[in-house]
Amino acid sequence: MHVIVTGANGFVGRALARRLAMAARLGHMPIDRLSLFDLSFDDAPEEAFVRHLPGDLGDMAWLRRTLAKTPVDVIFHLASIPGGMAEQHYELARRVNLEATTVLLESGKAQVEAGRRAPVFVFASTIAVFGAMPALVTDETLPHPLMTYGAQKLIGETLVNDFSRRGWVDGLSLRLPGVLARPPARTGQLSAFMSDIIRELAAGRPFTCPTSPDATTWASSLPCVINNLVHAATAPMVFPEARRTLTLPTLRFSMKELIDAIAVVHGAGVNTLVRFEPQERIESLFGRFPPLETLAAAALGFSSDIDLTALVRRAIVDD
């Protein structure tokens, strides 16, 4: 089995690469080759079957040459230009979020046309596709992205569905929520404060929260998201009406509830370390999330963290 992970030096990608390298298998199948794609690598797995492929995913010529070298069984496409960075650097975001996604999908087309099996294609989409949300988000809620990142991911979902319809990939798009707790990094993600508050309060440092206490959001721990990515690539699934996009189960909570959960894990004193200074843009993007129903994903075996305290414990341990 040959498995590819793009964005393998990112927060989620590193964790997924470590999981696959340590297990040396995906589901019941041993992994013969694990190819990791990213600009560069820090602390990447060094097992003999792991290949590190440093390069620019926005360089289509390099990407096509690299993909043409050997057939692929599973592609985890995690690489992206997220949130605020996509707003600031449209051309870069277009190349990585749209053009590279198309090239990866077309590698599946070429593989099928050469007489080989279509690869499994797990696409990391985002809840940013929803943009403005109704009072309740369900599997029937129509997306309406308000940022370039969400718009480009929505296009990627459509491509995954179309290439799957044509038998060129066996694809599934997963709309990921916020993933906690990310290490400090200049990624341009406006939602970074949700990771920062866990990390800073756990260390006993004061934190200024850019939302109100009652601001509500959705998030999952990193281990929970990795479990769901692996499940997407290994569990047999039948997709109603051939729709291959799922919003992952996740927890909805207020910032006050998150702080209370941090206090359960790290002591009641953390409540005194928080000052609230709401910023309207941050609150509007990440602080007004309504209740969420993910019945389709739950029926297919995807899951969320057990509760908010468990999420905090898992986030801190992984971080």
Image: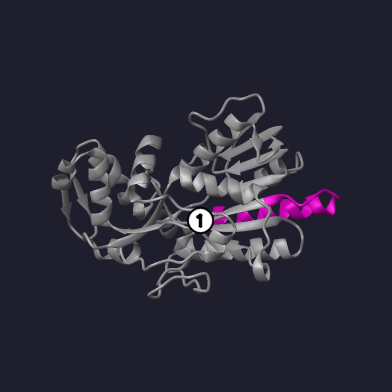
Could you tell me if residue 59 is visible in this image?
A: no
Q: Looking at the picture, tell me which residue is in the foreground, 119 or 299.
A: 299
Horizontal side of residue 110 vs 126, given as left or right: right
Residue at coordinates 62% horizontally, 66% vertically from top-left? 158
Residue 297 x %, y % = 55, 60
Horizontal side of residue 103 vs 140, given as left or right: right
Q: Secondary structure at mark 1?
A: helix
Q: In the image, is residue 83 above or below residue 28?
A: below
Q: In the image, is residue 5 above or below residue 24?
A: below
Q: Looking at the picture, tell me which residue is in the foreground, 39 or 237.
A: 237
Q: Which span of residues is magenta-colored?
A: 91-120
- Crowd class of label 1 (few under 14; some 14 to 19; many from 20; radius 10 Å): many
Residue 258 x %, y % = 28, 52
Q: Main secondary structure of the magenta part?
A: helix
Residue at coordinates 17% horizontally, 56% vertically from top-left? 276
Q: Looking at the picture, tell me which residue is in the foreground, 285 or 267.
A: 267
Q: Amino acid at mark 1?
A: Ala
Quarter of the figure with residue 47: top right
Say which quadrant the N terminus sits in.
top right
Q: Is residue 119 magenta?
A: yes
Q: Is residue 251 magenta?
A: no
